[in-house]
Amino acid sequence: MSALENSITASAPGKVIIIGEHFVVHGSYAVAAAINKRAKVTVSAGKGNESVILSNGEKTSVMGEKGKFSAAQAVARRIFEEYGTPSKGIRVEIESEIPPGSGLGSSAAISVATAASLSKFIGHTLDNDRISEIASFGEKSVHGNPSGIDSEASLLGGMILYSRETGAKQIPLNRGIQLLVVYSGHERSTSALVSKVTRKKEEFPSTFAHLSDAFSFASLQLVDALSTGDLPYLGALMNLAQASLFWVGCSTKELDNLIENVLSDESCFGAKLTGAGGGGSIIALPKPEKAGEALTRISKQYSSSFLVSIPQEGLRWE
Ligand code: MEV
């Protein structure tokens, strides 16, 4: 291990999936974007020999039982495995603006920022491919079979077209786009939802395969709609995605009602759940002149609502 610096801080953004969640796990294309809520990770020398992860007054040992911060724990263990366990304890402090379990990429952002800051602290400045590889251990600890889209969106920022086979391709945005994000306030487990969708795939393999192909097509169409500024079509694609996510069992009564509510005053072109579903958050595409109005109305019922302008910066040193 090289000489330790006093402290290293990196931050990475959360994300929304605009189209293709779940189907991307099974090989289809999907589109995701970084949001303006970030997780910041500061790494410094610890007091004793034990390396620890801290957040909001809670503490977990890196080498101890799988704790509350299992993503950061898995990333730290991987780094120690690859680059050697430091002889003195290290302190990994997480400050995150992204609610955990909200479908907004909290564990991916923490994994990316931990991978970058901890490796640099122990003397290894990693390139994006390595950060992504190590961050994926954080995601695996959370739900076993991640597609990789969450950590790529967090690492790169902006908007990406992603598939397991092709990896991430950044989508150039000639014009700004704004999304309305509403967190239902109900945490959910990504792993339970990913397993539920896999069971649906096993039950209806051929329908599922066709639907996956349709999501690849819809993702490419969405990229075109973005480049031409065809917001009504983009909204229509989001509504189509929501219908399919309902079919695979990822929506809930509350999310359905929330989406119906957001769409009821015609201030938005489309809306859908984002991320794993089963709770978590929804996104809507507001008509540009009505975005403020849509936010004001929904925030009266859902206090964790915000507008996000894309692009946002990916991983950065603080
Ligand atoms: C979770 O944000 C997105 C999922 O598609 C899982 C994944 O792609 O790893 C549900």
Image (tube, rainbow, N blue to C red):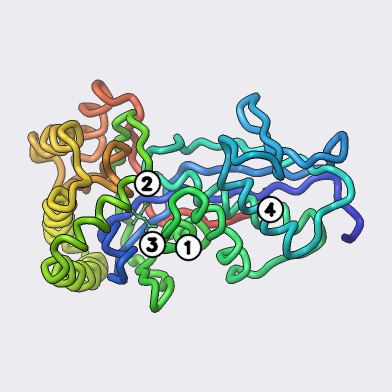
Type of residue at label 3? Met
**Residue 78 position (above or below residue 253):** below
- What is the spatial separation of the Cα atoms under label 2 and label 1, in whole angstroms? 17 Å
Question: Which is nearer the N-term, disc 2 or disc 1?
Answer: 1
Q: Residue at coordinates 47% horizontally, 59% vertically from top-left?
A: 157
**Comparing labels 2 and 1, the label whose residue is closer to the camera:** 2
Comes first in the chain, label 1 or label 4: 4
Q: CA distance from mark 2 to mark 4?
A: 22 Å
* Label 4 neighbour load within 10 Å: few <14, some 14-19, many 20+: some
For the residues labelled 3 and 4, the Cα–Cα distance comes to 30 Å
Task: Give the farthest residue toward the bottom.
Answer: 166
Residue 209, given in percent of the width and then of the height, sits at 18, 71
Residue 219 picture location, percent across and down: 24, 68
* Along the line of sight, the residue nearer the viewer: 234 or 29: 29
Point out residue 146 in the picture as x, y percentages from the top left corner: 42, 59
189 and 218: which one is in front? 189
Residue ID for mark 2: 190
Q: CA distance from mark 1 to mark 4?
A: 20 Å
> Does the residue at mark 3 contact the one at mark 4 (Cβ under 8 Å)?
no
> Can you name the residue that lies furthest to the right here?
3
- Rendered position, 282 above or below 241: above
Q: CA distance from mark 3 to mark 2?
A: 22 Å
Residue count near mark 1 (Cα–Cα under 10 Å), binned few <14, some 14–19, many ≥20: many
Mark 4 lies on a secondary structure that is helix
Does the residue tagged 2 have its C-beta within 8 Å of any atom of ligand 1? yes
Give residue 152's mark: 1
Q: Is residue 86 left or right of residue 62?
A: right
Q: Is residue 254 above or below residue 240?
A: above
Callouts 1 and 4 close, C-beta under 8 Å:
no
| Front tag of 1 and 4 | 4
State the residue in front, 62 or 135: 62
